[in-house]
Amino acid sequence: MRQDIKSSVPLPGFDVRHGDDQPRDGQAFTPPVKLDIRHVSFRYGDEPALTDVSLPIYANKVTALIGPSGCGKSTLLRVLNRMPDLYEDQHVEGEVLLDGVDILGHDIDVLTLRRRVGMVTQKPSPFPMSIYDNVAIGMRLNEELTPTELDARVEDALRRAALWEEVRDILKDDAQSLSGGQQQRLCLARTMAVRPEVILLDEPCSALDPISTAKIEATIEGLKPVSTIVIVTHNLQQAARIADYTAFLYLGSLIEFGPTEQVFENSVDERTSRYVTGRMG
Ligand SMILES: Nc1ncnc2c1ncn2[C@@H]1O[C@H](COP(=O)(O)OP(=O)(O)OP(=O)(O)O)[C@@H](O)[C@H]1O
């Protein structure tokens, strides 16, 4: 089980359940669980990358995944929208319940899942088409919008991604002509445009200047009423600023999970404490 995982909030499998937001033991309200990660293990071929990871991702909150390079943060994020399905040698075990349904099950429609759980990868990957079409493509496939509605949604997504001012006059240009940081914001706009219930962000600000970073962080905060956000970040200040909950991973295991303030200021595990205070590489 999970006796070795330090947590100041109830973990799934114990007493966290959907809609269970009653105060207990004088603690703050526990939000409902959107994604319930249960005993997830992962291998690349024979190489383990995650070992028995369990944690709740609370609805309409930001959860940061932190930990040293190679500890499995991106791997865990990729499991949450079944990216490993694309690779024969990547093996997942365990369960990930989205609103109570195991998304790792064989009967899950992966395309529908990826509409509900959107992901922005670490390396931006705009489609070979115009800036406008990159943002519009998901809405065109999934919704019946008038051209005016589509224009408005494209503009809204680009504004939220802090890109609108830079591209408003070049919407028909090839997206791949944008800079790396602009491409990353474009991919964020593309993901947000279809309004997924869960948004997975893998280092979304790694190529951004401080002004764009601040705008993206404000956008993430603004998304909370409509989405649940999981963010991988190496930037501990960023995690402390925007994450409601933080999970610390080390060598493929979850070491500690809890409200961000507690993980940063009052860690239970010595390894977490060393990492968040910069004493671990
Ligand atoms: N495609 C792959 N094939 C084989 N091993 C991989 C692959 N991708 C990642 N790994 C290995 O899995 C482990 C976890 O990698 P992962 O990218 O999830 O870590 P991370 O914490 O996100 O790292 P970083 O912070 O550097 O992005 C590492 O040991 C890594 O070398």
Image (cartoon, helix red, strand yellow):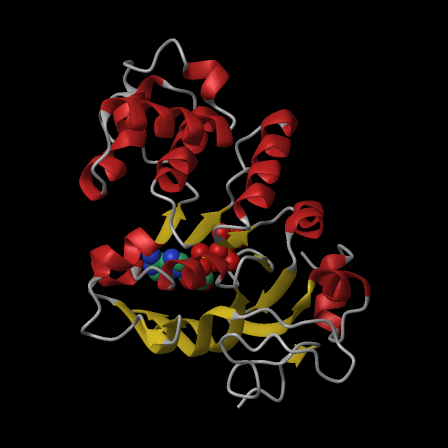
| Above or below: residue 141 compared with residue 22 | above
Q: Which of the image's four quarters has the C terminus?
A: bottom right
Instruction: From the viewer's perspective, tell me whether residue 112 is left or right of residue 68.
Output: left
Task: Name the foreground residue: 213 vs 124.
Answer: 213
Indicate the quadrant where residue 212 lies.
top right
Q: Residue 248: percent from the left, percent from the top?
A: 62, 65
Q: Is residue 161 visible?
A: no
Q: Residue at x 29, y 51 (%)?
A: 115
Indicate the quadrant where residue 177 lies.
top left
Question: Furthest-right residue in view?
Answer: 265
| Above or below: residue 125 compared with residue 155 | below
| Above or below: residue 7 compared with residue 200 | below
Instruction: From the viewer's perspective, tell me whether residue 186 is left or right of residue 11.
Output: left
Q: Residue 273: percent from the left, percent from the top?
A: 76, 66
Q: Residue at x 20, y 37 (%)?
A: 144
Indicate the quadrant where residue 104 lies.
bottom left
Q: Residue at x 71, y 67 (%)?
A: 272
Task: Name the foreground residue: 46 vs 124.
Answer: 124
Q: Residue 227: percent from the left, percent from the top?
A: 48, 52
Instruction: From the viewer's perspective, tell me whether residue 251 is left or right of residue 101.
Output: right
Q: Quadrant of ligand 1?
A: bottom left
Q: Report the label total.
A: 0
Q: Is residue 109 visible?
A: yes
| Above or below: residue 130 compared with residue 278 | above
Q: Residue 59: percent from the left, percent from the top?
A: 52, 63
Task: Name the foreground residue: 77 vs 147.
Answer: 147
Question: Furthest-top residue in view?
Answer: 169
